[in-house]
Image (cartoon, grey):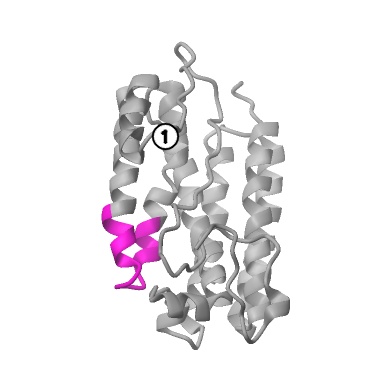
Amino acid sequence: MQSGASVKHPQVPELINPLRPRHRAQATISALPTSVAPRPTRPASGPKAPPVHSTGPPCTIPIRLACGANPLTGGLGLFTLLAYLLAYTPLKQRSRHSTTVGAVPGAMPPLIGFAAATGTLTLEAWILFAILFLWQFPHFHAIAWMYRDDYARAGIRMLPVVEPDGRSTARQILAASLLLVPVSLLPAATAMTGKLYLAGALLLGAYFVWHGWRVAREKTLLRARAVLLASVLYLPALYLLMLLDRPRL
């Protein structure tokens, strides 16, 4: 199945989102990992790394990252590739915990980008990793809830497929959105950002938690769709605030 191709949903076709998520159930189960790659929050301390182009087999990516940036970046790329191919992909048809496992390689781009820019991993890098790691749970659980039938037909054991009553899914969405609030404030606490980011992160976090609370109360497809749209708004807005409010630069 080609990326972007939709599977008709027999019950709620009007709710199919024009923002087609790349991380959808596919009969061939061949989707690439969905992740968001933010840029580092401060410039590189050494010479500017040359661009690393993405042409060539995926197995060569770690080598090209190591040669084009530095060995740490190559090692992180190798870990991401192996975690996705050898851990997350096989689990998709075996366990509902595949989302948790897949969130690790899904949150690696900030670490890879930070390592490429600075040659090291600092607390700031791990904060970026933690934000993206937690964000994935409301985002992908909402997608799995909306397209539960598609995932079930593809044999992918997402949480809404395994527990169709939606209680566990709603609890995890709300819990992750709540945890995301204090974690998203860490950039301000560590002087990565200033007061503008702090205020914006609080507002965005409250907005995200509100949608998580609504889906926990009502457990409907409409509320799951609202969580998805909130997640699509939340992450870019949070990163934009980081870029606009950088006292260390």
Q: Which residue matches tag 1? A: 112
Q: Considering the whole magenta stretch, tell me its main secondary structure.
A: helix
Left or right for 231, reference 179 = right
Q: In the displayed structure, does residue 187 sit left or right of residue 161?
A: right
Q: Give the amino acid at mark 1.
A: Ile
Residue 122 place in picture, x, y as percent = 40, 31
Up/down of 70 relative to 81, above or below: above
- Image coords of residue 193 (percent x, y): 61, 34
Look at the numbered disc 1 and give the secondary structure of its residue: helix
User: Does the rendering let one see residue 33?
Assistant: yes
Q: Quadrant of residue 13?
A: bottom right
The x and y percentages for residue 142 are 56, 70
Tell me: 73 left or right of 53. left
Residue nearer the viewer, 78 or 128: 78
Along the line of sight, the residue nearer the viewer: 135 or 20: 20
Magenta residues span: 86-102
Q: Of 246 and 73, which appears nearest the observer?
A: 73
Q: Residue at 46% of width from left, 11% of height from top?
A: 47
Q: Position of residue 29 (x, y in %)?
A: 40, 64
Q: Residue at x 51, y 69 (%)?
A: 141
